Each structure stands twice: as structure tokens, then as C-alpha cells.
Amino acid sequence: MPQGLQTILSGTIVFRVPADAVMEVGPLVDYPLPASWWEASEKYKNQTKLVKLGTGGYTLEGYHARTPFPDYSGPEKAYKILYNLYYHYGGSVAHYESDGYEVDRYLSVYKNLSYQVFLQFTHMTDPGFPGHAAEMPGYFSSYYDELEEPEQSKYTSPLELIYDDPQKVPEFYVFLPSLRRALRLSSSARCAPYAGSDYVGDDIYAGIPLPVGWFQARFLGERKILMFRPTPGNRAQFTTFHRSSSPNRWWANGRYLTH
């Protein structure tokens, strides 16, 4: 189980489930990525290289689009996985509303509701989305978050701009309703708490540490993990078979089939 779920089930914190609660584990289900993403992964899979940095970490050369290292292996396996996460598939435009419940030291509870938009500028694979590299040169993606609740924080809106170069510190901005203007924040603001919670800027990009090359990675092993996932809608776009460059191998639903 993920660490957070383990903690909630342990009953040692404020957030907990009833002692008689039952978790129903369903069958293993494959949720593949769009066919266009896998086509790009197959096309460019041998062009991306890891380059050692003086920090002890790695950067990339030759990246175009898709998962940088679909067949990760070797002594740099951990760094290949790390960059697969950095260039993960998130869709050209993703927008959603989410809520969470905050508890302060006095056990007062309030709901934190926000509207979020993720936009990718370059390295596009989704058909019909040419990207915005011309308007935003040098940037990879952006993340916008606008608070709707609680009322005293309404319209507070942080914006993170992530560079195409994973070795650059992202830019941070925030719109403050009390000042009626946006402010550019220090790069160190990525470690500052947001809206009275323990959520920080470094949590925004899927929990991936930025800049990536400043950190060292170590591969610990492979595990199956329980996750809460909604049932997808139309999956027809994921069912096309694609011929691989390797003999007797085909892409099907985001994985190799060998015969």
C-alpha cells in the first residue's frame, strides 16, 4: 500500500477509518496510455541518453517526446525511472477540481477546494494539440491552482512554470486577491507551505524533485501497489495493435506482446 494509506489505516493520526472498515480489492486492470504516446516511445526510444553531472546526478540529451526509457535497465536504472516520471504522460491539457480536508493543531477541520489546470507546451504526442513552444520557448509545462474554498483564501492562485531543461529551478508566481495583483516568488518558495497546509511547491509536479539533476536516485525493487482508480470511459483509442521494430513483438494496450 502507499505510505499515506498505510498511515490512515494504522489509526495513529487524526485521519482514520472505522475499526470495522473493510477494503475490497478488485481484479488487476490495465489502464494503458494513448496509442500515440506508445508510437512516439517506439520511434524515439534509442535517441535519449543519460549524461553524468558534477552534482552526482544525471541530465538528458536527445529527448523528443514520450517515455524517455521504455526499456529501462542497467546500472542507471533508477535515473531512467526518475526521468520517465519527469516526462510522464499527463495529457496536453488536464483540468480538474479537487478537495481536501485540513486539520489544525486545535483539531479544527475545514475543506480546501481548488480548481487546477495542467498545460504542456512542447514534446506533444496527442493528435490535434500542436503545443505552445512558440509562445512559451524554453518551457515544458505549467501548473495553475485556484482556491475556491475556504472563503478567506478564495481566488488565491499559484502558478508554477517548469522548464524544458530539467536542471533549471521552476518559476513560481501567485495571485493574491488582497493585493489584486500577481507576484513572482523566490525559487526557494517551492519549500514553503501553501494556504496554511503542509503542501509545498515541490509537491506539485507529481512529487518529482526539481531540478532533477540535483538529486541522486537508487533503485530499491519492484512491488505491486494498491491504488484507487476510477473506471475509464471510452477505451477504444487504446485497443489498436502496433508493430514493434523488434521481430515478433507488437504494442498492445501499452505493453509488449511476444509470440
Image (cartoon, grey):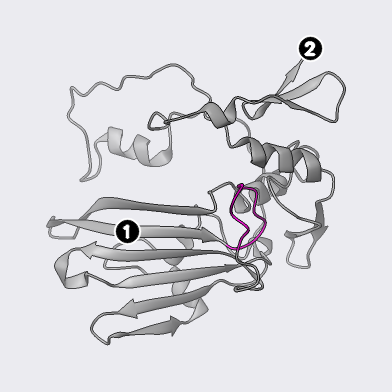
* Quadrant of the drawing holding the N terminus: top left
**Is 238 one of the magenta-colored residues?**
no
Q: Residue tagged by mark 1?
A: 115
x 21%, y 24%: residue: 21
- C-alpha separation, residue under disc 2 versus residue under disc 1: 46 Å
Say which of 200 and 229 sits in front.
Answer: 229
Q: Give x and y (percent) for residue 130.
A: 63, 58
Say which of 215 and 49 sits in front.
Answer: 49
Element under label 2? loop
Q: Which residues are magenta?
A: 121-131
Element under label 1? strand
Q: Residue tagged by mark 2?
A: 259
Say which of 167 and 183 sits in front.
Answer: 183
In terms of image quadrants, where is residue 108? Answer: bottom left
Residue 224 horizontal side relative to residue 13, left or right? right
197 in relation to 240, above or below: below
- Going by the picture, which residue comes out furthest to the right? 247
76 in relation to 174, above or below: above
x 78%, y 68%: residue: 54
